[in-house]
Amino acid sequence: MCVFQMRRHVRPMFLSSQLLKFIYDSVTFAATRIAIAYLGFPFLVLELRPVLEIYRYLVYSYVLVQWYCHLLNCK
C-alpha cells in the first residue's frame, strides 16, 4: 500500500536529528487526525445531505492525495 511505501522511503530522511523527527511526528499525527475526522464525520452527523455537502467541498483534498500517491508510483 502507498502508506507503507511512503513510510519506508520518507521516514528515514527525518531520523537524522531530533528536530526533524519531531516535525515528522507532528505532521503525521496531524494527518492521521484529519483522516480520521474525514472518515468519521458521517457517523457523527447521521444525515446524508450535510455529509455530501462537506465531502463535495473536501473532494479536492482527496484528489490531491491520490495524485501525490500516483506520482510516487504507489500500488
Image (cartoon, rainbow, N blue to C red):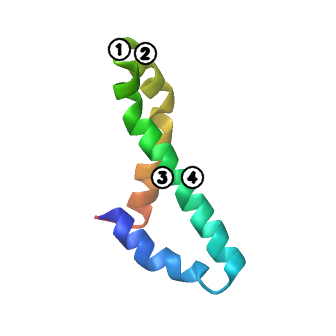
Q: Circle 2: is it few (<14), some (14-19), or many (20+) Cα within 10 Å?
A: few
Question: Which of the 4 image quadrants contains residue 50?
Answer: top left
Image point 50% across, 47% down: which residue? 33
Q: Which residue is mark 3?
A: 32
Question: Which of the 4 image quadrants contains residue 39?
Answer: top left
Answer whether labels 3 and 2 touch (C-beta < 8 Å). Answer: no
State the separation of the CA atoms marked 3 and 4: 5 Å
Q: Circle 1: is it few (<14), some (14-19), or many (20+) Cα within 10 Å?
A: few
- Foreground mark, 4 or 2, reads 4
Q: Which residue is mark 1?
A: 47
Q: Which residue is mark 4?
A: 30
Mark sitting earlier along the chain (3/2): 3
Specify the amino acid type for callout 2.
Pro
Specify the amino acid type for callout 4.
Ala
Question: Which of the 4 image quadrants contains residue 25?
Answer: bottom right
Answer whether labels 2 and 1 touch (C-beta < 8 Å). Answer: yes
Specify the amino acid type for callout 1.
Glu
Residue 60, position as x, y percentages in the image = 49, 37
Q: Which residue is mark 2?
A: 50
State the separation of the CA atoms marked 4 and 2: 24 Å
State the separation of the CA atoms marked 4 and 1: 26 Å
Front-lying residue, 11 or 29: 29
Specify the amino acid type for callout 3.
Thr
Front-lying residue, 2 or 44: 44
- Foreground mark, 2 or 1, reads 1
| 54 sits to left or right of 19 | left
